[in-house]
Amino acid sequence: MATICTINISSDIAPGFGGISESMTLTQAGTVTDIDSTTGFQRRKLSATAAVDLVTMASELVEPKDSVAAKIFIRNIGYKGVIDKAVGVTIGVNAEPIGKLYGGDWMMMPLTCIDADDVTATPATDDIVVLEFVMFYEEA
């Protein structure tokens, strides 16, 4: 069973921009073989400004291959149906900030899956926020 990701972007702030619509099937590195493993879809409620590990690479039940075709999806869904654009959560890898997800924002990015490269989330405030996330990867 294939894992397919699709994105559609339209904008009225860029004159002449016709939009983008792209799909990609998640495959193992350098092949057309479907990616074979996932952490499973998860939610994590955060309520403090301390960094937390969303994914601790060295603790995965099934060891992901290092430096291959892993991808992670993360979305800030707010709390109890309230999406607060003022509440940002900085996402990082190996303590390096990647970007900030405000209420309703999401991201999908590639990962190396090296044991030290944990995926972290650091809320800007102590307001409660919930993140949804799932990682797709190849087994070692």
Image (cartoon, grey):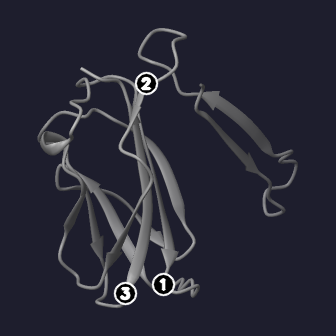
The residue that appears at 51% across and 12% down in the rendered structure is 33
Q: Is residue 103 above or below residue 70?
A: below
Could you tell me the amino acid type at mark 1? Tyr
Q: Earlier in the sequence, mark 1 or mark 3?
A: 1
Q: Are marks 1 and 3 in contact (CB under 8 Å)?
A: yes
Q: Quadrant of the C terminus?
A: top left
Q: For mark 3, what is the residue?
A: 128
Q: How far across and down, in percent of the image, does residue 94 sit?
A: 17, 49
Q: Is residue 49 above or below residue 57?
A: below
Label 2 – label 1 distance at C-alpha: 32 Å
Classify residue 65 by image quadrant.
top left
Q: For mark 2, what is the residue?
A: 36
Give the numbered dot on residue 79.
Answer: 1
Label 1 – label 3 distance at C-alpha: 6 Å
Q: How far across and down, in percent of the image, does residue 60 sit?
A: 21, 41
Instruction: Answer few, some or many: residues within 10 Å of disc 1's Cα (few below 14, many 20 plus, some between 14 and 19).
Output: some
In the picture, measured across the screen, residue 10 lies left or right of residue 25, that is right
